Image: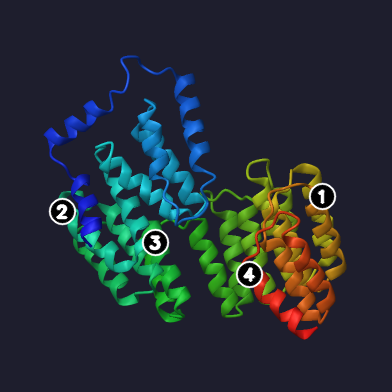
């Protein structure tokens, strides 16, 4: 706990210390141009990005950067934190947040505090997140900070604590936002509290709180669990008539998922076709990855293969895309096409991701094709792969059975 409190104290330094920190940022007598700043941002991130292991600290990289006399300003570091959070690299995002106050004496704003609280919960657990919250001065405990703690409670599935915090927010005069309601809705959904879910949806509507995409998405999932076909129909009409909702591929993919779960495949296919039509160049790979898995969930192999060809023609496919198509085909028990696509992946010269051969190795074992599994295991290291625990387990298993 002493470790975290040391960092916490640095977050709430007095004016004099903060000013000393500002002086420490005066790394040059020149004002960096936009071009220089953009270059420095991309170069520093290129140093950080390859460190994928969360157990490996990126602090030495940051220290080395400033020792070279290079800039490390608050806005730049905030952008790194945002990017790392997007890729779920929470440990490294937290390290940057700590480094901002520890080494650069940067004063945290309220949103920075909320983000750090969320990261502490993800990296160190609920107890330390609560301790951090209690250490935050009361005048800085704004709605964002309470919302971050609420999210920590939801992640830990601490229903009673989440409900108590929500009530405290109301008592303090913080009007719960759509985001806060979504967190509690998600918690009720994940813990199977159907009655509380229904009551909270009613409260949201009575309070005139605007539904967003996530509110609709979690409501669709709840309808699917309850096998409520008519509920899904009703929600789809609400979504399509809601002027505040941008109808993009994510909306119709979620609708398709709900229909698939209740077995209404014709409506699921209609929704997926709409989703495809709405895919744009922005994060197109992510869209295709998700829609592929939806077609597979609906048992539509021809659609999976059709979309895969479109995907390859429009985007450079990386390992994540190959994992999606292989997972989809193996779900459909199409091991022959999976092997062809695995060979295609190998021919692309992408960074070797052991999870991809593991998918095929596991499929061979489930089929009783032990010789093929063993042969594939033997190719991993010569191909540049680093076997993980699963690979070794399969290797030992197939060898013992032979």
Residue 228 percent across, percent down from the top left? 60, 78
**Which mark sits nearer the N-terminus, 2 or 4?**
2
Query: Disc 4 designates what residue?
Result: 258
Mark 1 in CB contact with mark 4 (< 8 angstroms): no
Q: Indicate the colouring scheme.
A: rainbow
Q: Residues within 10 Å of mark 4 (few under 14, many from 20)?
A: many
Residue with the mark numbered 1:
347
Real-space CA distance between mark 3 and mark 4, rounded to the nearest whole angstrom: 29 Å
Cα separation between marks 1 and 2: 58 Å
Where is residue 31 drawn, in percent x and y? 36, 16
Residue positioned 32% across, 58% down in the render = 147
The residue that mark 3 highlights is 122
User: Are there few (<14), some (14-19), or many (20+) residues within 10 Å of tag 3?
Assistant: many
Residue placed at 40% from the left, 64% from the top? Answer: 183
The residue that mark 2 highlights is 138
- Which of 321 and 277 lies nearest the eye of the viewer? 321
Mark 2 neighbour class, 10 Å CA radius: few under 14, some 14 to 19, many 20 or more: few
Mark 2 secondary-structure assignment: helix
Asked if marks 1 and 2 touch (Cβ < 8 Å), the reply is: no
Where 314 sits versus 289, above or below?
A: above
Residue 258 is situated, as x and y percent measured from the top left of the image, at: 63, 70
| Badge nearest the viewer, 1 or 4 | 1
The nearer-to-camera label among 3 and 2 is: 3
Position in image of residue 64 (x %, y %):
39, 35
Whether residue 266 sits left or right of residue 392 in the image: it is: right
Q: Alpha-carbon distance for marks 1 and 4?
A: 37 Å
Tell whether label 2 touches label 3 (CB within 8 Å): no
Residue 363 seen by the camera: yes
Q: Are marks 1 and 3 in contact (CB under 8 Å)?
A: no
Distance of mark 1 from mark 3, alpha carbons?
38 Å
């Amino acid at each position: 706990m002493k470790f975290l409190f040391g960092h916490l104290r640095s977050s709430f330094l007095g004016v004099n210390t903060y000013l000393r920190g500002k002086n420490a940022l005066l790394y040059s007598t020149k004002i960096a141009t936009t071009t220089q700043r953009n270059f420095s941002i991309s170069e520093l991130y290129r140093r950080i990005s390859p460190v994928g292991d969360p157990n490996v600290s990126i602090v030495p990289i940051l220290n080395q950067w400033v020792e070279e006399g290079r800039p490390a300003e608050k806005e730049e570091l905030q952008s790194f934190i945002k990017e790392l959070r997007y890729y779920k690299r929470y440990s490294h995002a937290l390290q940057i947040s700590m480094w901002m106050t520890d080494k650069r004496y940067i004063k945290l704003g309220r949103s920075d505090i909320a983000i750090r609280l969320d990261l502490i919960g993800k990296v160190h657990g609920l107890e330390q997140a609560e301790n951090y919250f209690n250490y935050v001065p009361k005048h800085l405990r704004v709605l964002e900070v309470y919302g971050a703690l609420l999210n920590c409670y939801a992640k830990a599935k601490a229903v009673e604590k989440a409900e108590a915090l929500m009530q405290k927010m109301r008592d303090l005069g913080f009007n719960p936002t759509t985001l806060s309601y979504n967190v509690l809705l998600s918690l009720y959904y994940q813990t199977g509290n159907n009655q509380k879910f229904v009551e909270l949806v009613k409260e949201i509507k009575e309070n005139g709180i605007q539904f967003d995409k996530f509110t609709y998405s979690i409501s669709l999932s709840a309808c699917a669990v309850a096998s409520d076909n008519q509920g899904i129909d009703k929600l789809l009409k609400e979504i399509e008539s809601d002027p505040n909702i941008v109808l993009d591929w994510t909306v119709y993919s979620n609708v398709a998922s709900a229909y698939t779960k209740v077995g209404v495949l014709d409506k699921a296919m209609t929704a997926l076709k709409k989703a495809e039509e709405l895919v744009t160049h922005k994060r197109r790979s992510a869209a295709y990855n998700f829609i592929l898995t939806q077609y597979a969930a609906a048992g539509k192999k021809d659609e999976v293969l059709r979309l895969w060809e479109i995907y390859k023609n429009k985007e450079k496919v990386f390992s994540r895309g190959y994992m999606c198509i292989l997972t989809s085909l193996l779900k459909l028990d199409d091991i022959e096409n999976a092997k062809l696509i695995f060979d295609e992946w190998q021919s692309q010269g992408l960074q070797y991701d052991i999870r991809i051969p593991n998918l095929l190795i596991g499929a061979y074992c489930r089929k009783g094709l032990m010789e093929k599994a063993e042969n594939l295991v033997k190719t991993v290291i010569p191909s540049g792969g680093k076997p993980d625990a699963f690979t070794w387990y399969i290797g030992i298993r197939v060898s013992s059975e032979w």
